[in-house]
Image: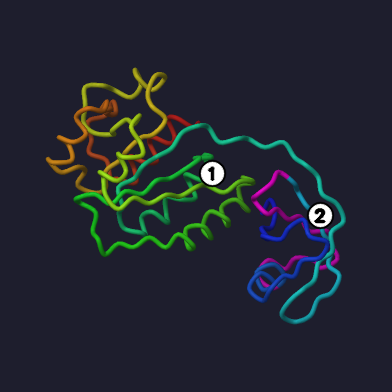
């Protein structure tokens, strides 16, 4: 664990509530006499605290110092992902967060099941936990569009991940910064027709990838 997230990091005194207290002092068995390191994931500071008061359910911590740290800025690169099973999204998120993906855009498309509802607060908690483990100091951004048309009213310079003779390895240096990946089943015929004006990019392998595999492959190629 590289640091502890607390939204009020930087205040002279912060309180660790029951859930965070249990995680730190019961599950992780942190020594209450040791210095603790916090971030708020809003600025570049690492905040050092010491425990001032502790009881059975919560603790108060006092600020000792704030230190600005050098951070790796996310590349100007975003993935648009057709909404798929939230469980699949949740399993993929930590991987994308570790790779420093700047923004993940969700788009409801023809093959998206409308009963799939994404809980953005839950997704935020997942990437916060990931940040604590991998050391990333900013929060990945999320955006949701209710349809392909709504998405295309805002974004125009995009690449479509689909079967194509345009192979990724030969084009990745000159392609747009937003990549659109379909859900399980890909794109339907009306969507393919609507997307004909955009460049389509395929992988060297002709194997059919799951939606999450395609997202991870794109992120790995462009961010590593």
For the record, the magenta segment spans 26-44
- Please tell me in which quadrant of the rendered image residue 187 appears: top left
Q: Tell me the number on the disc at residue 8.
A: none
Looking at the image, the residue that sits furthest to the bottom is: 56
Separation of residues labelled 1 and 2 (CA atoms): 24 Å
Q: CB under 8 Å between callouts 1 and 2?
A: no
Name the residue at 23% across, 59% down: 113
Residue 173 versus residue 176: which sits nearer the camera? 176
Q: Can you identify the residue that label 2 sits on?
A: 48
In the picture, the quarter occupied by the N terminus is bottom right
Query: 10 Å neighbourhood of mark 1: few (<14), some, or many (≥20)?
Result: some
**Apparent side of residue 53 relative to residue 3 in the rendered image (left or right):** right
- Determine which residue is flagged by label 1: 98
Query: Is residue 28 within the magenta segment?
Result: yes
Which residue is at a point 50% across and 40% down the rendered structure image? Answer: 102
Q: Residue farthest to the front?
A: 153
Query: Local crowd at mark 2 within 10 Å, few (<14), some, or many (≥20)?
Result: many
């Amino acid at each position: 664990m590289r640091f502890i997230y607390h939204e009020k990091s930087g205040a002279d005194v912060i309180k660790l509530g029951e859930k965070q207290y249990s995680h730190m002092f019961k599950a992780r068995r942190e020594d209450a006499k040791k210095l603790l390191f916090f971030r708020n994931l809003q600025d570049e500071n690492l905040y050092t605290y010491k425990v001032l008061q502790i009881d059975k359910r919560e603790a108060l911590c006092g600020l000792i110092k704030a230190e600005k740290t050098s951070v790796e800025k996310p590349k100007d690169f975003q993935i648009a992902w057709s909404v798929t099973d939230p469980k699949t999204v949740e399993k993929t998120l930590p991987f994308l967060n570790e790779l420093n993906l700047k923004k993940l855009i969700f788009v409801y498309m023809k093959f998206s099941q409308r009963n799939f509802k994404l809980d953005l607060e839950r997704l935020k908690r997942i990437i916060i936990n990931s940040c604590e483990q991998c050391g990333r100091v900013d929060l990945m951004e999320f955006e949701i569009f209710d349809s392909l048309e709504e998405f295309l009213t805002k974004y125009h310079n995009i690449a479509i991940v689909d079967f194509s003779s345009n192979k990724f390895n030969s084009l990745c240096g000159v392609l747009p910064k937003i990549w659109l990946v379909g859900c399980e089943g890909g794109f339907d015929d009306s969507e393919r027709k609507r997307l004909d004006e955009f460049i389509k990019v395929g992988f060297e392998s002709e194997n059919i990838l799951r939606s999450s595999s395609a997202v991870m492959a794109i992120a790995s190629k462009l961010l590593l």
